[in-house]
Amino acid sequence: MVIFSAVSAVIVYTWIGIRTSQKKRLRKWPYNRYGCWALGVVSMFLAFTLQMHGHSDFTMHMVVHLLLGMLAPLLFVLAAPVTLLLRFLPVTLARIATKFFKLRPVQFLTHPVVAAIVNFGGLWILYRTSLFEWMHMSTPLSILIHIHVFVAGFVFTSAMLYIDPVPHRSSFQLRAMVMVFGFTVHAVLAKLIYAESLSGVAAADARKGAILMYYGGDIVDALLISVFCLFWYRNSVFSKEKIPSEGVRE
């Protein structure tokens, strides 16, 4: 079932990309976005496959955290799924979808500061309260937490990169400060887990997981920062020529 869902997700995205590329008024959908989507699906698939082992192995739990909460969201954001959907939908439905993104609650939740608080604040609550123990005693709670980890990671990454259309954009400076704050919180949390362990987790296992969280998170953060800086550079160079430089204009 999981393999079928993963393959279906890749096929549907590819089909929509090819279908919209055949329209004369639209540009061809970039090949690198097909790759990002496929890798994002693989990351999700691996996270789902490994999450059962995370109940008894904190290091494996942290692998799932990196795949589900950091790498998959980044890859999916780079695939620009909202832009692709707007290209595919009829004009009437595309306008309805656009109005949805302009709603005040949606704008509030996708603001960089709010997205960072929800994303990193959620992790802080998970690892600094009894919630981590409870999630391993309740399957529904565990599912909800994993969904939250992915959605919060996706919204945060979207709020940093603006690859899909965004009605109200925050400045590069504000987003840069939010990223520094968020990545600092993530690193401090990893160090606290290393130093103090977690209830119900062996100290050695907690240290391994904390090291993976710290350095593995740095790798994904570096990828996100690289894309962010690329957009910032392009915006600085081409803004005087009024050439769209950040995100998608299709």
Image (cartoon, rainbow, N blue to C red):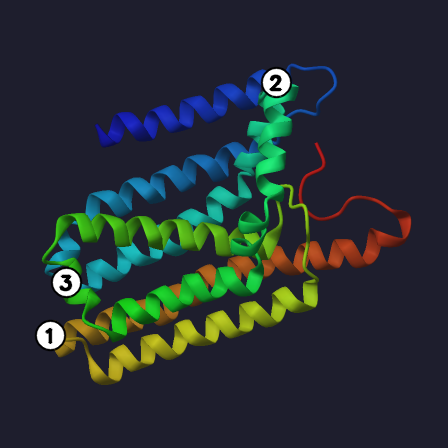
Q: Secondary structure at mark 1?
A: loop
Instruction: Find the distance from the CA under tag 3 to the CA under tag 1.
Output: 17 Å
Q: Nearer the viewer, mark 1 or mark 2?
A: 2
Bin the neighbour count of mark 1 within 10 Å (Cα to Cα): few under 14, some 14-19, many 20 and up: few
Bin the neighbour count of mark 2 within 10 Å (Cα to Cα): few under 14, some 14-19, many 20 and up: few
Q: Are marks 1 and 2 in contact (CB under 8 Å)?
A: no
| Residue identifier under label 1 | 202
Q: Amino acid at mark 1?
A: Ala
Q: Which residue shows up at 49% across the image and 64% down it?
A: 116
| Image coords of residue 138 (percent x, y) | 12, 54
Q: Is residue 65 left or right of residue 229?
A: left
Q: Which residue shows up at 25% across the image and 29% down it?
A: 3
Quadrant placement of the N terminus: top left
| Residue identifier under label 3 | 134
Viewer-proximal residue among 123 and 101 = 101
| Image coords of residue 119 (percent x, y) | 42, 61
Viewer-proximal residue among 231 and 115 = 115
Q: Secondary structure at mark 3?
A: helix
Instruction: Find the distance from the CA under tag 2 to the CA under tag 3.
Output: 45 Å
Q: Tell me, for residue 90, which label it has, or none.
A: 2
Instruction: Find the distance from the CA under tag 1 to the CA under tag 2.
Output: 55 Å
Viewer-proximal residue among 124 and 20 = 124
Q: Amino acid at mark 2?
A: Pro
